[in-house]
Amino acid sequence: MDHTRVHRLLRMLWLINSRPGWDAPSLAREFGVDVRTIYRDVRGLSSVGLPCEYDRARRGYRSRDGVFLPPVQLTVEEALSLAVLCERIAGQGAIPYLTAATRAIEKLRCVLPVETREEVGAMLDGVRVRTAAGADPTEARDVYDRLAESVRAAAVVRCRYDSLSSTSEFDFHPYALFFCVRAWYAVGQHTGRGEIRTLKLNRFASVAPTGERFTRPAGFDLASHLGNAWRMMRGPEHQVEVWFDAEFAPTVSDTIWHPTQQTSHHEDGSMTFRCTVSGLDEIVWWVLSMGPHAVVRRPPELAGQVKKLARGILGVYAGPRASAPGARKKPRPSGRGRGGGGPGRTKG
């Protein structure tokens, strides 16, 4: 066997033992080979005494008990990356409910060679990570724990949920949890709506087990479900084209805003941004955040939304509310089930 295949086989064993769900198609995508190559690799592992077998319950391969793998040997770069993720992001609450990662990295650092441990410690002092501010991390901790267990066990839960306009009760089949920019969300079958919905965790007023189980749709994948949504609110697909002036063009082009984006630079320093987006309800707020430096060329629906909202903003500052703050309506009380609207609103 050549060196590249040996490396692939060893890494395949690590992946299979790290978590369930690695089947032939997912392994093929991971290694950039076809599925038949993965089947040959599985047979190759078995031929040298490292048998792997497909487990229907885990929906992926697993190695038989007793397969030996050498202890973890981390490079300084690998150890530093883990320390940044666990201590600077999870440990400092940048992503809520992951603080247990700090205990994990403490255990891991204890078994690193002294030289590696000291080098990582010195480098970590110079690394800081700042993410977007989010909701109170203690507010929905119990909801996160219960839904995470429900995802693992494929257990149906009875929910009471506060959307922007009403409170409802329904049975929920949680397929996945994911964190998007500022908050955690649950994706699953909403029995009251009869479809897959995306629900914000801090809007759950209660979550209780029903004792029933559900079957996740075959082939469900969160990335495929979200499609080309700007972030998480999927809708009809649109070809978007936005022109940026020379002042904002460098900043916009330096960032990957969307996986489908393409940019074209013009002689005057301006730039045209293009992407394929499923739904306009989120990207409209991104365009507005660029102020007068951006002009929507297409689709006309997006340009119309930007105009309408811009007129509304102008009306607020030109009308009586701008000079008489006391005349404004009282804001909606904060707390669980009272998440903000605008770009952060979800399908409730």
Image (spheres, rainbow, N blue to C red):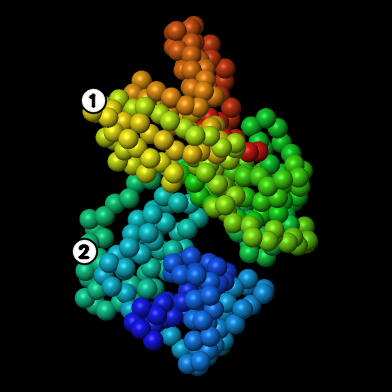
Residue 45 image position (x, y, % from top left):
49, 86
Confirm whether residue 22 shows in the render.
no
Residue closer to the observer: 223 or 116: 223
Confirm whether residue 348 shows in the render.
yes
Amino acid residing under circle 2: Ala
**Where's the N terminus, which quadrant?**
bottom left
**Is label 1 in contact with label 2 (beta carbons under 8 Å)?**
no
Lower sequence index among marks 1 and 2 = 2
Residue closer to the observer: 162 or 244: 244
- Counting other residues with Cα less than 10 Å from the Cα at mark 2, is it few (<14), some (14-19), or many (20 or more)? few
**Relative to residue 302, is residue 295 drawn left or right?**
left
Classify mark 2: helix, strand or loop.
helix
Q: In this view, does 272 lie above or below 109?
A: above
Identify the residue under disc 1: 268
**Where's the C terminus, which quadrant?**
top right
Amino acid residing under circle 1: Asp
Residue at the image position 40 percent from the left and 63 percent from the top: 102
Classify mark 1: helix, strand or loop.
loop
Q: Nearer the viewer, mark 1 or mark 2?
A: 1
Q: Is residue 119 above or below residue 242?
A: below
Q: Distance between the residues labelled 1 and 2?
A: 46 Å
Residue 341 image position (x, y, % from top left):
55, 31
Residue at the image position 36 percent from the left and 64 percent from the top: 82
**Relative to residue 243, is residue 298 drawn left or right?**
right
Identify the residue under disc 2: 122
Q: Locate residue 241: give its quadrant.
A: top left
Residue 255 image position (x, y, % from top left):
33, 42
**Label disc, if present, on residue 221 of the rendered structure:** none
Residue at the image position 53 percent from the left and 85 percent from the top: 43
**Relative to residue 8, is residue 119 drawn left or right?**
left
Residue closer to the observer: 1 or 199: 1
Residue closer to the observer: 253 or 157: 253
